[in-house]
Image (cartoon, coloured by chain):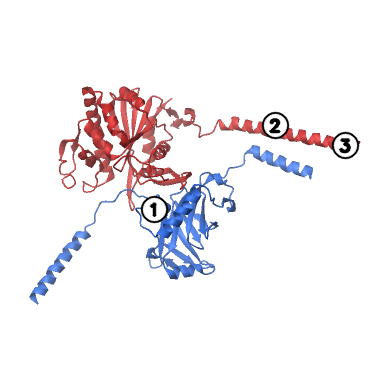
Chain colours: A red, B blue
Amino acid sequence: MNKQKPVKGIAIFCVVLVLVLVIVYSGLRILESTVFNSSDGSSQNNTSKTITRDGIDYFPRQDITVLMLIGIDRYGQLESSGFYRNDSSADVVALLIFDEKSEQCNVLYLNRDTMLEMPALGITGRRAGTYYGQLALSYSYGSGLEDSAELTRETVSNFLYGINIDYYAVMTMDAITILNDAVGGVKVNVTDDFSEVDPTITMGEITLQGEQAINFVRLRRGLGDQLNISRIERQKEYIKGFVEAFRAKKEESSSFVLSAHSEVSPYVLSDCPVNTISVLMDRFADYELAEIVSPEGESVLTDFYEFHVDEEKLDELILRLFYAPK
Amino acid sequence: MKKVISLLTALMLCLTMACSVYAVEDPFVPSINYRNDALLVSIKDDAGNVASGLLRDADGNIIAYVYDSCLSITSIAEALDFRYAMPEDIREELVDVYNELNDETVKLPYDELDTDLRPADIAIRELIDATLACDDHAAELKKEGVVIELIFDLGIDKDASVFAFTYIEGEWGTIVNVVNNGDGTVTCTFEDLCPIALCVAEQQPEVPSWVARIWETLSNWLARFFR
């Protein structure tokens, strides 16, 4: 009988000790998660995204809506590759920044050859580190649908200090023809000699119709210096012309947007629901197109072209477009 | 004879003109660099010729350079795309292996790796087949201690952890000698060529927190107390 008492006492001591240790451990874990995670730099709250330059704090602007346009280098409807890779690339990446304060729209046009880090997918579709390469390739990870668009969104966002990109719209080349013709053609000033590649596109002012629009924004070979930078200038010229034609058409008949949408939808993929598109149209259609800017940098020729941005100037551009001083 | 000479002269003239046409460099640089698939990085042999890899003996001496015509590299992306022509046995094996890994009926032996990383942190970045097409190289590689060294451009971060596995006779085995060169490329040394899985860690090893360290100390203390 006497022997049982010390055994029982040790057992109770052990149980109590284990309980105390569990409570202490849990308490420390809770303390750690509350105290330390609140200062985690990866947090998505705006305070953590504050940037300080020359003693001035800048915070992300809340009065802008950002829509990312992705033009991919393929014809036909958007289809899944059924695999972790697809053979499309983002030939055009442009951010439309709608500024509610000034009622203006700025366009940040990114060079598709921009060299940057992008999230890479492994063969089973899981994240597998990063890949350093041209921005256009960010779309080639994933099936070619939403997952690819999300990867391009993440790549661009990371490149621009984690800015919020509200919506994206991916389009194949067929969409250009449809939209171009829906607004009644797009007037541009042609400064390159297209005679060898499309003789119907003549020098000087011309209203592009159908396939001409694709040839104007897409072709590089046989045109001037054949560089992507020159093509970007043509694409900027096209955007300006498109916005003007869009406004004029909207004045004429606002219902054309809906009819164009149904025609173009098989060639467009967006995370923006139709009713939101309608709201955005109403809110932003009359905004003035303020400027179309591109990050400055240097094109370097390896086997292909690589565009290396001027980090200092990019910093200024990001602050100007997406941040406001406190 | 005169006719032959004039014909030859005309032919020479045509050839010269054609050469001068081709000698004008086309300034057009083709589209973007599709480097997403594991790309074999070329090396130079002693004479400055381009080679795809090299064979080393057990002491690390170079036995032979392997040239493009002697080495065939096929990625799973190519194998799954029937537009690419390739030997059917290679396609079949690569696709089978891919399906097993994709539906997780077979898992890579991550537990054999000398790392603190959890299997959940490691993902298969590329699956490729490498085959030696030249018999003399294949015979060399079968010898004791002989290895083949290949460099792949994965475009990975300089600090990324990278691992490689080979599929030999129905079993996945770990490749010990894998080096992240810090410029996006990886050097792998293989004892045999076959399907190769190149893996990258999504996260760095978790650093034990101060709570975990206290817990570890307490556990050790308890273990000693009850011993």
As drawn, the residue found furthest toward the right would be A2
Give the image location of residue B53, x and y in percent. Answer: 43, 62
How would you rate the neighbour count of disc 3 (Cα within 10 Å): few for under 14, some for 14-19, many for 20 or more?
A: few
Q: Identify residue type, mark 3.
A: Gln
- Position of the C terminus of chain A by quadrant: top left
Tag 2 and tag 1, C-beta contact below 8 Å: no
Write down the quadrant of residue B42 in the picture: bottom left
Of the image marks 3 and 2, the number of the one nearer the N terminus: 3
Q: Secondary structure at mark 2?
A: helix
Q: Which mark is residue A23?
A: 2
- Position of the N terminus of chain A by quadrant: top right
- What residue is drawn where x is 19% and y is 61%? B20
Q: Are marks 2 and 1 on the same chain?
A: no
Residue where numbered disc 1 is placed: B78
For residue A13, side relative to residue A287 (left or right): right
Q: Mark 2 against mark 1, which lies toward the viewer?
A: 1
Instruction: Please give the chain letter of the residue carrying mark 1.
Output: B
Q: Secondary structure at mark 3?
A: helix
Disc 3 versus disc 2: distance between alpha carbons?
Answer: 29 Å
Q: Mark 3 against mark 2, which lies toward the viewer?
A: 3
- What residue is drawn where x is 28% and y is 33%? A264
Give the image location of residue B3, x and y in percent. Answer: 8, 73
Give the image location of residue A56, x and y in percent. Answer: 44, 28
